[in-house]
Image (spheres, rainbow, N blue to C red):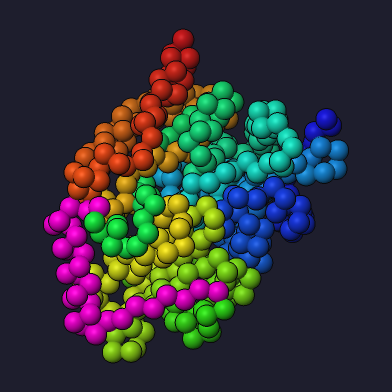
């Protein structure tokens, strides 16, 4: 093996075929087309605080591994909140930015971050990738961060000197449901009645829902969706959103077969819309907006329509987006998600280690509290195919012990 690496400033520096050979089964957001659209429509770039800097590892001249990466000049659009760390740097007269992150911009969805060719040995390449990232310390980069990788990567990341941060999201799992009524039957009577009542109220308000996929997503539906998307950000943040109309137009043109668009109509006029991406790995709810306020409309468009679609398409899971305890009572189970962090200045790395050691138990407690209020009935609960809860605090305990020596 003759490994060497490079950091590329645009994803077009590697061909789509070469990237796709590494990104098989990596989910829709790591496809060359998705990442390329972010760059070509200038949704990412130095002016946005997301400067592409993807890591490519070669064996001779053949790409065998890749990590999507960005130089960041702020912490917006990451969903792993480290502003207090940046403030600490500032207080001591240092700069936390720029930093390097491996992540999908504006997309807090767990998935692989190190993309590998089928024939390579994962442990060998992981070690080399960690060494390659460490060279960023020589380029005035304060730190390296890997956001929303699989939990199973924790051991290798900690061995490479990274700190693990734990958070909780909510995800729907498909327990071999054949119909939406099977999912309803798994809920407690009270929750089942509440869901049916919500749908009846929408019907009484003359609200109808349509789902569009593939070539059925026509230009009028696309335009209406983007109007809704803009409205959401205008209400919340006073701007039109991180992603441009050109990005979504390109997405509809190139990835429509991986897209579900839900549109709500009242008196036959479109009033709300939600956009999902999907492939064999699962269904992912990402973007939503509404022009009117109607009780239950958000839950119907963003959650229950997604669940129905996932059951019909036999999707293994449905990730509806980040945050929101309200998802629990609608059948979404808590799951751990993680990020890994290496601060190149030892004193700051040690300080963050202590911070995470104190933060993690609160996340574990939150996870267990959420699991206690799942809305499934006593008949169904024993059949939940949940794995044994991992000891997510273990790595941080061991890291603290090392640091304290």
Task: Determine if the magenta segment contains residue 355.
Answer: no
Residue 296 visible here:
yes
Left of 92 or right of it: where is 324? left
Residue in the foreground of this view, choosing between 48 and 315: 315
Residue 34: where, in percent of width, then height?
A: 61, 61
In the rendered image, the vertical position of residue 191 relative to residue 123, given as above or below: below
Residue 355 visible here:
no
Residue 141: where, in percent of width, then height?
A: 62, 39
Residue extending farthest to the top is 405
Q: Residue at x 23, y 72 (%)?
A: 199
Residue in the foreground of this view, choosing between 354 and 270: 270
Residue in the foreground of this view, choosing between 270 and 211: 211
Q: Main secondary structure of the magenta part?
A: helix
In the rendered image, the vertical position of residue 398 relative to residue 232, given as above or below: above
- Quadrant in the picture for the N terminus: top right
Q: Magenta segment range?
A: 186-214
Residue 113: where, in percent of width, then height?
A: 59, 43
Residue extending farthest to the front is 178
Residue 272: where, in percent of width, then height?
A: 35, 77
Task: Determine if the magenta segment contains residue 191.
Answer: yes
């Amino acid at each position: 093996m003759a490994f060497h690496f490079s950091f590329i400033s645009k994803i077009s520096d590697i061909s789509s075929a070469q990237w796709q050979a590494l990104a098989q089964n990596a989910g829709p957001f790591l496809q060359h087309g998705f990442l390329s659209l972010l760059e070509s429509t200038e949704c990412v770039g130095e002016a946005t605080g997301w400067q592409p800097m993807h890591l490519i590892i070669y064996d001779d001249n053949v790409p065998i591994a890749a990590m999507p990466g960005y130089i960041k000049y702020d912490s917006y659009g990451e969903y792993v909140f480290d502003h207090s760390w940046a403030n600490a740097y500032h207080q001591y007269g240092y700069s936390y930015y720029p930093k390097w992150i491996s992540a999908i911009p504006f997309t807090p969805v767990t998935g692989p971050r190190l993309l590998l060719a089928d024939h390579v040995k994962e442990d060998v390449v992981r070690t080399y990738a960690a060494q390659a990232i460490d060279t960023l310390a020589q380029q005035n980069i304060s730190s390296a961060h890997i956001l929303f990788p699989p939990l199973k990567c924790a051991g290798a990341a900690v061995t490479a000197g990274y700190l693990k941060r734990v958070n909780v999201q909510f995800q729907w799992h498909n327990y071999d449901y054949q119909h939406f009524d099977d999912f309803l039957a798994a809920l407690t009577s009270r929750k089942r009645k509440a869901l049916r009542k919500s749908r009846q109220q929408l019907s009484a308000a003359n609200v109808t829902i349509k789902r569009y996929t593939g070539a059925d997503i026509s230009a009028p539906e696309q335009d209406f969706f983007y109007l809704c998307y803009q409205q959401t950000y205008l209400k919340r943040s006073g701007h039109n959103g991180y992603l441009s109309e050109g990005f979504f137009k390109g997405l509809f043109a190139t990835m429509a077969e991986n897209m579900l668009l839900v549109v709500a109509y009242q008196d036959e006029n479109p009033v709300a819309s939600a956009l999902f991406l999907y492939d064999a790995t699962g269904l992912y709810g990402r973007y939503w907006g509404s022009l009117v306020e109607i009780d239950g409309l958000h839950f119907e468009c963003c959650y229950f329509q997604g669940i129905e679609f996932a059951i019909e398409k036999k999707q293994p899971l449905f990730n509806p987006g980040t945050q929101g305890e309200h998802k629990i009572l609608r059948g979404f189970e808590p799951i751990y998600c993680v990020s890994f962090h290496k601060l190149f200045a030892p004193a700051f790395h040690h300080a963050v280690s202590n911070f995470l050691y104190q933060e993690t138990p609160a996340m574990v407690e939150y996870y267990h509290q959420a699991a206690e209020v799942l809305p499934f009935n006593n008949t169904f609960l024993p059949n939940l195919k949940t794995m044994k809860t991992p000891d997510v605090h273990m790595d941080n305990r061991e890291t603290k012990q090392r640091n304290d020596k």
